[in-house]
Image: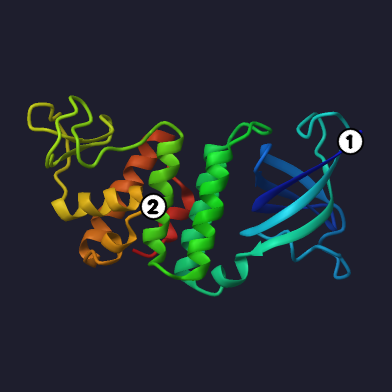
Amino acid sequence: MSLIRDDGVVLRVQKLGEADRIITLLTRQHGRVRAVARGIRKTKSKFGARLEPFSHVDVQFFSRGADLVGRSLPLCTQVETIAPYGGSIVTDYGRYTAGTAMLETAERFAENEGEPAVQQYLLLVGALRTLAAGLHESHLVLDAFLLRSLAVNGYGASFTDCAKCGMDGVNRFFSLQAGGVLCSDCRVPGSAVPSPETLVLLGALLSGDWQTADNCEPRYWREGSGLVAAYLQWHLERGIRSMRYVEK
C-alpha cells in the first residue's frame, strides 16, 4: 500500500453508489488516472466542490499496490485546489462548450492509464487558464489547443511549407491525409482550397501569435474551425462528441 501525490485537471466525474464518484484526471506525472472519491456527493463532504470538471488540483491518492494504476482504483484521500478554472468557465456557454471539448480531447490523447503525458497536461492547463481569463474568443482558444495537441502527439499540421516536398512559400491546397498544405505539384485529389487568410490564422494559432489570430475576420474563424475539426477527426478516427455544441 502506498500514498502517491500528484497534481492534475479533473476531466470528468461519474456517480458510484449512493455517495461516491469515480474521478478521471489528467495528471502531471501519471497521465490519465481514475480514482474513487468516497462520500463526495454528501453535503458534508470536505472536498466535493474541489473535484469538479475543469478544476486544477493537488491530489493525494491511496493505492493498494506500489503503482497508482493497478487492478483496483485508488482512493482520493486529500485534495487541494490549485486553480478553480470551472468557476469562470461554466458561467459562459461559449467557454463551457469549448472547455468541455478540450477535456474530452485531452482524455482521448491520454488513453493509456498511468502513462505520463506531460506535454498534453501542460497544454490543457494553459488552455484552461486562457479560456477562464476570457482574453480571446473561446473557439480560437479551443482551435489553438487542438492544433497543439495534435502536434505534441505527432500529428502536427503544416500551414506554410508543403507537407510532402517541403517547398516553402504560399501553398494553397490542404489535405488531411498529407498533414497540411500541399504545393501544386504534390496536390492530391480531394484537397481543400481554403482562403490564404484562413491558413495564416491556423498558423498563428499553432505558433501562439495571438495578435494575428485576434485581428482575423470572423469568416476565416469559421473556415479554420472546420479544417481543425476535420483534421482532428481524421487522426483520432472518430469525432469529439462535444464539438457539436461549440459555438462558431
* x then y, percent, for residue 88: 57, 72
| Residue drawn 77% across the image and 51% down it | 59
Could you give the CA–CA distance between mark 2 and mark 1, rounded to whole angstroms?
38 Å
- Disc 2 element: helix
Label 1, secondary structure: give it. Answer: strand
- On-image quarter of the N terminus: top right
* Left or right: 18, with 184 as reference point: right
Q: Residues within 10 Å of mark 1 (few under 14, many from 20)?
A: few
**Quick one: 164 or 238, which is closer to the camera?**
164
- What residue is shown at x 49% (from left), y 56% (from top)? 127
Residue ID for mark 1: 2
In the picture of the structure, the residue carrying the numbered disc 2 is 144
Which amino acid is tagged 1? Answer: Ser
Density class for disc 2 (Cα within 10 Å; few <14, some 14-19, many ≥20) is many
What is the three-letter code of the residue carrying label 2? Ala
Looking at the rendering, which quadrant does residue 221 occupy?
Answer: bottom left
Q: Is residue 237 visible?
A: no
Name the spot of residue 136 as percent of width and height, x first.
Answer: 39, 67
The quadrant in which the C terminus is found is bottom left
